[in-house]
Amino acid sequence: MPQVISSLQLHTLTLTLNRPDKANAFNRDMILELQNALNDAAANDQVRCIVITGAGSTFSSGQDISEMEMVQDQDISYHEHLRETYNPLILQIRQIEKPIIATINGTVAGAGLGIALACDLRIAADDAKFTVGFTGIGLVPDSGVSLLLPALIGLARATEFTFSNLPISAQDALSWGMVNRLMPADELMPMTAQIAMMLSMGPTETFGATKKAFNRAMLPNLAEVLEYEGELQEIAGKSEEHKIGVKAFLKKERPNFL
């Protein structure tokens, strides 16, 4: 079964993260499938707008924590993992010269949040929740979250919700500028289709050039930030706090870092 489902209709390519039994958590295969789908979309003239969403009632819970547990006793480099997976994926989303909409149909956390924040527009269900997630398992924000979240909601709010690991409600996400629109769950995909159609009928080349301008003006150091996140994650991934956080997460307990 594909872990990313692709559907092209009326010049809009919808990419659905498809691990609903795992809350659409990313493993390496799903990341690579999404990268390949985005590469194909960039080269396909029939694709004029891209939508990323999740199967079931979750957008994505981020990295599959069970994968982390399996490699904790091995000499695995988190920095290299990010270089191969999330870092190029975030850069892809920002550099594809076509509009990309994140349709956030439920909970989004961790690297899933980074992917959503990297998209050009975010349309969310009115019961969606946004959790930074990293510090709860003794890690630092990666996938561009350390840059994109403060850029959208401000440093103080980003710091509070990263340190506390509390979810941001859909209503706060809208009022703080994290999302563009909220919709009842049953209206989310129809509204996405309407916006995607409007964008697909627009001047795609001009939209692409505008993305380049916004990247230069607002995110000129994105690649550098992604690399630095990886350096910090390499340190955090070898810490005792990370081991404690992962064990507690898998047991669905509150971690005790004392």
Image: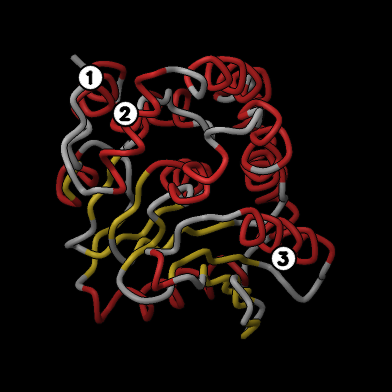
Q: Which mark is residue 108?
A: none
Q: Residue at x 58, y 20 (%)?
A: 234
Q: Which quarter of the figure has residue 29?
A: bottom right
Q: In terms of depth relative to the viewer, which is nearer, 217 or 157? A: 157
Q: Are marks 1 and 2 in contact (CB under 8 Å)?
A: yes
| Number of other residues with Cα within 10 Å of mark 2, as a class: few under 14, some 14 to 19, many 20 or more | some
The reply to whether residue 2 is visible in this rendering is yes
Q: Residue at x 76, y 61 (%)?
A: 36
Q: Residue at x 55, y 24 (%)?
A: 218
Badge 1 is on which residue?
257
Identity, as a three-letter code, of the amino acid under mark 2: Ile
Q: Residue at x 66, y 18 (%)?
A: 224
In the image, 160: left or right of 239? left
Identity, as a three-letter code, of the amino acid under mark 1: Phe
Q: In terms of depth relative to the viewer, which is nearer, 25 or 117? A: 25
Find the residue positioned furthest to the front. 73
Badge 3 is on which residue?
37
Badge 2 is on which residue?
244
Indicate the secondary structure of the residue bearing disc 3. Answer: helix
